[in-house]
Amino acid sequence: MVNTSLKYVDLIRQRTSKWANWFPEKQDIRVGSYGRFNAQTGRFDVEGNVYDPEFQKLLDATDGKMKLSDHPPVLDEEEKDFAVGSMGVRPKDFSLGSDVVEGIDKAAYKQDWQFLQDKRGAMLVMYKPRQEHFPKGKVFEALYKVPELKEKYIVPSVYKCRAYAIYLSNKTGEKISMALLPKSGEENKTQLEWWTDSKVENLQIKTDNDYVFSPLFTCKRKIPLIRPLMRDSPTPDPVDEGFWMECYPPWEPLDDDGEIDPVYDDDQEDDPNVYIPRRDSVYVPYPISDDSDDE
């Protein structure tokens, strides 16, 4: 049995160094959300948001001056379509004509996706996303001082979109043709709907009139500060996001079905000096680097 959501999140993170949401229709990940990842499903379990009134009380106890309501998230302009596949997954020119797909000449997006035989692959498409994020300046600095965030992940930015397509392959070398078309009818000319020739399992395609979906987001955690060697040396104040870092996933390496593929000796299971993610803290003490292009 395939652990679909966990494998999808893991593959997209490897490709983008960002975190994917397998449940964009059901789970709205917002800027300022904090919590932990579920190591069994890859889902980000939200425990709260820094813009909630309850969190402001925590901030007042440490800062007393910063009002996050005066520093709301910034919503950037539309970007180009975001389309990415995991290693070995290739986008190709749309292969079908107007004799098969009515209105294909008016498509807002059209693409074929080719997946590998005997290898799991993932795909994410967002139509003209807009990135929403913390404003530059004092937000990160103020949040760093809140002790309740010490063992949490925090979401500083999300990609919002009106239409998305996500898929985890079934390892049969399948090809999927898909297009984003205007709905029929004069009254629906600004609305979009997905067309695809595929009925494969695990393909999710959704549209809306507004930017309500958040299929991709970033996460950061605090960098632990080391006390100065000299007793009288002051601990430096955090500057913007300089004291925050990217994070490793809380699960060990996965096999093709999304199950744990251990890389340590089982004899070390009871050794307290050996870091084992499923037993110990979900965090590691150094950031992940950006993945390089696989081409």
Image (spheres, grey):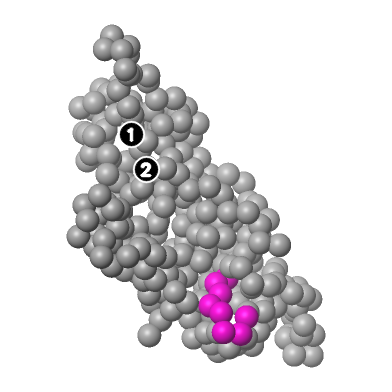
Magenta segment, principal secondary structure? Answer: loop
Of residues 228 and 21, the one drawn nearer to the viewer in this rendering: 228
Res. 107 image quadrant: bottom right
Res. 196 in view: no
Q: CA distance from mark 2 to mark 1?
A: 8 Å
Amino acid, disc 2: Pro
Where residue 128 appears, as percent x and y from the top left, is 63, 58
The residue labelled by disc 1 is 224
Amino acid of disc 1: Pro
**Left or right placement of residue 116 versus residue 69 in this view:** right
Residue at image x 62%, y 80%? 116
**Point 55% across, 72% down: residue:** 122
> Mark 2 or mark 1, which has the lower sequence index?
1
Residue 90, by quadrant, is bottom right
Pointers 2 and 1 in contact (C-beta within 8 Å): yes
Image vertical order of residue 116 relative to residue 217, above or below:
below
Q: Quadrant of the N terminus?
A: bottom left
Q: Which residue is mark 2?
A: 285
Q: Magenta segment, which residues?
A: 116-123
- Locate the C terminus by quadrant: bottom right
**Could you say which is closer to the camera, residue 148 or residue 248?**
248
- As drawn, is 5 to the left or to the right of 199? left
Q: Is residue 111 magenta?
A: no
Q: Classify mark 1: helix, strand or loop.
A: loop
Image position of 35 with respect to 74: above or below: below
